[in-house]
Amino acid sequence: MSDDPIAKFKETQKQGWAYFSPLASLTTPVAGRLVKFAGVKRGQRVLDVACGTGVVAVTAARTGAKVSGLDLTPELLNAARENSQIAELDIDWREGDVEALPFGDGEFDIVLSQFGHMFAPRPDVAIGQMLRVLKPGGTIAFVTWPPELLIGASFSLVGSYMPPLPPGVSPPPQWGDPNIVRERLGNAVSDIVFDRDRMLFPALSLQHYRALIERTAGPMLKLVEMLGRNDPEKLVQFRKEYDAMILPYFEDNVVRQDYLLTRAMKR
Ligand SMILES: C[S@@+](CC[C@H](N)C(=O)[O-])C[C@H]1O[C@@H](n2cnc3c(N)ncnc32)[C@H](O)[C@@H]1O
């Protein structure tokens, strides 16, 4: 593994996200919402950044758009390829990093990211790349987790149990704060629009929800692996804190979770 802390960070992310596929059934309805919110149309060139198993890319391609999907994690791209085959769609899948997009300037009409670019370590680099490959007048749209709600706050809880982030790496839930999003998009865009919607996680018990997230969400999976190996008592403490956090969101066998949608036009 490289000695560069940013490269190491990405390698750990890649390993952690390899088990994400079971959660894709829950991000599928959000993809429908995002593709409509972004106004994807037939014939447009669309990029899905950090596409995972391709739920956004496939939804966009069903409108007749010409779609590329890029992700760091090869295991998820295998699932994405299978998804486009099942849906009988031709999608350009790429293994790659949002911080170094393998596309030319202004290639896309629309650049999308669903719970994706928020995990890149350096927000300025990621957003710079997403805007670079977008045409002037094109649309950038993404979905992120607000820091004050369960998932955003749980990433902060995970962070508090992990070694400190390498210098220059920003915590993912910052992307769920409209003020920070506005600042990061800066003068490169106009017409910023925010919206919120709700995702529902069916769960037989609060512990079922926790078990699912511990097995599938990269940063959580890595923390549980580390504590299970080095400090089982701390793992018990972490789970207690996490369960208390989940409790107010769990009702009628569903964990409710609101997400932030952002859309803007590149100048
Ligand atoms: C929560 S999953 C979301 C996947 C998908 N967009 C969805 O909504 O189902 C986060 C994704 O971000 C990807 N990812 C994390 N860091 C990345 C980076 N630097 N470049 C590209 N993809 C990255 C992971 O591999 C993972 O697929």
Image (cartoon, grey):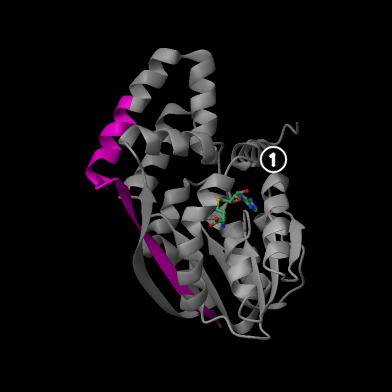
| Residue 101 on the magenta segment | no
Residue in the image at 46% along x and 14% along y:
231
Residue 119 in picture, x, y percent from top left: 54, 49
Q: Nearer the viewer, residue 164 or 102?
A: 102
Position of residue 205 in the picture relative to residue 106 (left or right)? left
Q: Specify the quadrant of the image occupied by residue 158.
A: top left
**According to the image, label 1 marks what residue?**
7
Residue 69 in picture, x, y percent from top left: 68, 63
In the rendered image, the quadrant that contains the N terminus is top right
Residue in the image at 54% along x and 24% along y:
225
- Against 87, residue 51 (above or below) is above
Q: Nearer the viewer, residue 58 or 109?
A: 58
In the rendered image, the quadrant that contains the C terminus is bottom right
| Residue 262 on the magenta segment | yes
Magenta region, residue range: 240-266
- Against 234, residue 239 (above or below) is below
* Total marks in image: 1
Position of residue 122 in the picture relative to residue 85 (left or right)? left
- Against 238, residue 259 (above or below) is below
Position of residue 106 in the picture relative to residue 256 (left or right)? right
* Type of the residue with mark 1: Ala
